[in-house]
Image (cartoon, helix red, strand yellow):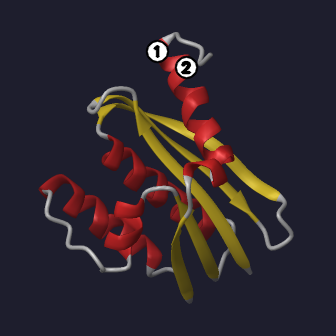
């Protein structure tokens, strides 16, 4: 089975209150999972990696053999494709965790999209951050 994951990570302030957002869809576009996770005070890049790791784990739980990972973080996409080196020590650990999670699949791809094309995952991030910070996005 092939699944598509849409992930986003965000922090209000950098670092600041952070969250990961994940949406997993099947080949027909049906949403199989949609959720967010509060990450505490973290950076945007940390949140982007945590969202990807969570999505890979969820895709594995759902029985995926192939996964198309769609992110609006060009940095994480290029690092996962090994086009960019991961220089920051904290991100190196997350890269290894994401790389190891990706090994559970026969095929994994990482694709960058603009934020406007990743609204569902972005909405999950904002829903969690609004709740955790007691704010509503206007």
Image spot of residue 35 (x, y percent): 63, 42
Image position of 106 (left or right of 34): left
Lateral position of residue 94 relative to residue 35, left or right: left
- Residue 85 percent location from the top left of the image: 20, 73
Please, is residue 88 above or below residue 13 in the view?
A: below
Are the residues flagged by discs 1 and 2 in contact, CB closer than 8 Å? yes
Residue located at (57% from left, 65% from top): 70
Circle 2 sits in a helix, a strand or a loop, which is it?
A: helix
Q: Which residue is mark 2?
A: 130
Quadrant that contains the C terminus: top right
- SS label for mark 1: helix
x 61%, y 74%: residue: 68
Q: Is residue 68 above or below residue 128?
A: below
138 and 31: which is toward the camera: 138
- Work out which quarter of the rendered image holds the N terminus and state it: bottom right
52 vs 29, left or right, is: left
Residue 105 in view (yes/no): no
Image location of residue 109, percent across then percent down:
53, 79
Residue receiving disc 1: 133
In the picture, measured across the screen, residue 128 lies left or right of residue 119, that is left
Which label belongs to residue 44? none
């Amino acid at each position: 089975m092939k699944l598509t994951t849409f992930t986003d990570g965000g922090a209000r302030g950098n670092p600041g209150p952070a969250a990961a957002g994940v949406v997993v869809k099947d080949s027909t576009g049906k949403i199989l999972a949609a959720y967010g996770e509060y990450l505490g005070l973290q950076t945007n890049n940390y949140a982007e990696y945590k969202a990807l790791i969570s999505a890979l784990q969820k895709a594995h739980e759902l029985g995926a053999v192939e996964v198309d990972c769609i992110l609006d973080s060009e940095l994480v996409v290029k690092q996962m494709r090994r086009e960019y080196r991961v220089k920051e020590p904290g991100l190196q650990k997350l890269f290894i965790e994401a790389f190891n999670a990706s090994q559970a699949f026969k095929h994994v791809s990482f694709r960058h999209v603009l934020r406007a094309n990743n609204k569902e995952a972005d909405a999950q991030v904002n829903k969690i951050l609004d709740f955790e910070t007691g704010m509503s996005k206007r």
